């Protein structure tokens, strides 16, 4: 197409790619991804190489410019993207794995390829509908309050912090109660949302690493007696350290009695509520806000978190903005009807950018919607149950190997110790086993005790993988 008109000097477009070239390279990307997934088991679970030289070797981008992406794609795949923890590896048991499903990868690819945006209703009613639909499906399957409205965010850290912002906006200031097992993102969230440090109380957990309702009740009574106002409590269903599940029903009853906002962090463990016995997760319908990370145990590529808030309109009240330059994209269109409130759970036209801090938002729903539509909730629940069973199997193998179980398998997490090893010793042991490449595991501290920790949520993991990993720990430990 000619782009030349006498007197009009427009520089040429240097960025386009010939459609056939894009098709060829796209096929290469697909083949390379398939190869990655097919050969994971033969490659290291965690590969920490220093890649500064090959990746930055050509100096500034201008010097590296080739105009053809093939070499760069190979460098990405073979060097830069290889040098990382492989959360999708069947023997990656460290921190929280990310075993993304191939179907979700396809959904994500398409959304990226079609530059899918989920911002205003006018800017993307299809993508907004996908997001509202997946949030409704999961809300109902998890048993959250039917009134709960949601938003998709990047991860548990942002979702927890967003929940704290809503809690602060919707209730008068006062004391925030956490436990010593509350995820660090919430402590940081309290700081960045301006919760005064003096109003943040960290309560001790019991022998099972759970926050007992009686401990919360005592702390609340103490604060009330001292003239302070209790404002918010955070419960965790599936703690990061040990997979412990707080008694949400008991905590909710204290919260109700004293008017506290109850935030439940299910970033890790939330999907267990989809299984037949709900993994012991009860009372989720009592949460004022609830977080779940599909990029952990719902098999999604990074990044993806869900936040629900039970009080209709609360997300909108906290985050809505209506500048003149968005009026014709917001729901209701150019008439300015976009200034209407998000009308609550029943509303199907929603400007999602008015439910959180992001304006331009990638459509994170496409991959999740495709996963849910393809597999259905039962298959996903079965995959979650498999993770729970794998941790139980690992517990048996650890006992058989003569290692000490510190906290029994709980929601896919097991911690254990090697007698005679201190904190540094457990960390070094985890590092040595991981450096060997066969498996990756991590260390942590539970009730002051250094431990090794396995998180077994990858459905591709086999009992043989677990046995090999426990054997590797024994080999390095003796
Ligand atoms: C219980 C819990 N909450 C929150 C988070 C933070 O999630 P993200 O890493 O997605 O920000 C984690 C991460 O492991 C977690 O385990």
Image: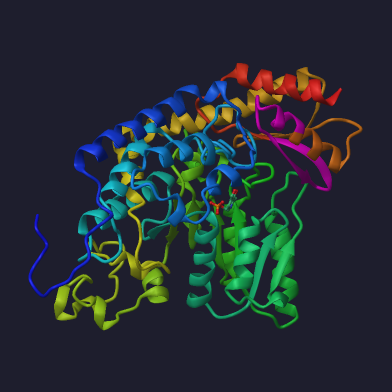
Near-viewer residue (80 or 128): 80
Q: Name the image quarter holding residue 145.
A: bottom left
Quarter of the image with the N terminus is bottom left
Give the quadrant of the C terminus: top right
| Total marks placed | 0
Find residue 396 and report its horizontal and vertical position in percent. Answer: 70, 21
Q: Is residue 274 left or right of residue 239?
A: left
Give how far across and how far down residue 7 sits, in percent. Answer: 10, 75
Q: Magenta segment, which residues?
A: 432-453
Asked where in the image residue 456 lies, by quadrant, the reply is: top right
Q: Which residue is at 64% across, 26% downward?
A: 392
- Quarter of image, res 8: bottom left
Q: Is residue 439 magenta?
A: yes
Q: Residue at x 38, y 46 (%)?
A: 66
Which x, y percent locates residue 256? 56, 66
Name the residue: 55% across, 46% down. 268
Q: Which of the two residues, 361 or 299, is positioned nearer the viewer here?
A: 361
């Amino acid at each position: 197409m000619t782009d030349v008109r006498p007197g009009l000097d427009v520089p040429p477009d240097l960025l386009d790619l010939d459609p056939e070239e894009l098709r060829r390279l796209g096929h290469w990307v697909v083949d390379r991804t398939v190869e990655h997934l097919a050969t994971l088991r033969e490659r290291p679970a965690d590969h920490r190489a220093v890649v500064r030289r090959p990746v930055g070797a050509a100096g500034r981008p201008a010097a590296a410019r080739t105009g053809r992406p093939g070499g760069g794609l190979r460098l990405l795949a073979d060097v830069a993207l290889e040098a990382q923890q492989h959360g999708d590896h069947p023997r990656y048991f460290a921190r929280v794995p990310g075993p993304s499903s191939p179907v979700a990868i396809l959904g994500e690819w398409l959304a990226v390829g079609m530059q899918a945006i989920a911002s205003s209703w006018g800017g993307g009613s299809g993508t907004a509908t996908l997001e509202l639909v997946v949030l409704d499906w999961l809300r109902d399957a998890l048993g959250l309050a039917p009134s709960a409205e949601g938003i998709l965010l990047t991860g548990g850290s942002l979702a927890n912090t967003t929940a704290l912002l809503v809690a602060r906006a919707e209730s008068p200031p006062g004391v925030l109660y956490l436990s010593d097992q509350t995820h660090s993102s919430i402590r940081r969230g309290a700081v960045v949302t301006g919760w005064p440090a003096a109003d943040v109380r960290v309560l001790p957990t019991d022998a099972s690493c759970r926050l007992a309702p009686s401990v919360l009740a005592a702390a609340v009574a103490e604060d009330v007696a001292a003239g302070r106002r209790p404002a918010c409590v955070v419960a965790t269903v599936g703690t990061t350290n040990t997979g412990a599940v707080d008694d949400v029903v008991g905590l909710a009853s204290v919260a109700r009695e004293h008017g506290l906002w109850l935030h439940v962090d299910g970033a890790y463990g939330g999907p267990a509520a989809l299984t037949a016995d709900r993994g012991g997760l009860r009372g989720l319908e009592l949460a004022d806000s609830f977080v779940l990370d599909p990029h952990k145990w719902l098999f999604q590529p990074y990044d993806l978190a869900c936040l629900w808030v039970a009080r209709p309109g609360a997300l909108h009240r906290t985050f809505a903005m209506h500048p003149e330059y968005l009026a014709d994209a917001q729901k209701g269109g150019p008439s300015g009807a976009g200034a209407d409130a998000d009308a609550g759970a029943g509303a199907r036209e929603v400007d999602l950018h008015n439910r959180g801090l992001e304006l331009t938002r990638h459509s994170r729903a496409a991959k999740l919607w495709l996963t849910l539509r393809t597999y259905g909730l039962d298959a996903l629940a079965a995959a979650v149950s498999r993770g729970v069973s794998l941790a139980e199997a690992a517990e048996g193998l650890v006992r058989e190997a003569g290692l000490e179980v510190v906290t029994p398998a709980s929601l896919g997490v097991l911690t254990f110790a090697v007698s005679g090893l201190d904190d540094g010793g457990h960390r070094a042991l985890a590092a040595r086993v991981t450096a060997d490449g066969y498996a990756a595991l991590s260390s942590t501290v539970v009730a002051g005790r250094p431990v090794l920790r396995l998180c077994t949520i990858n459905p591709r993991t086999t009992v043989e993988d677990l046995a090999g990993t426990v054997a590797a720990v024994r080999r390095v430990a003796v």
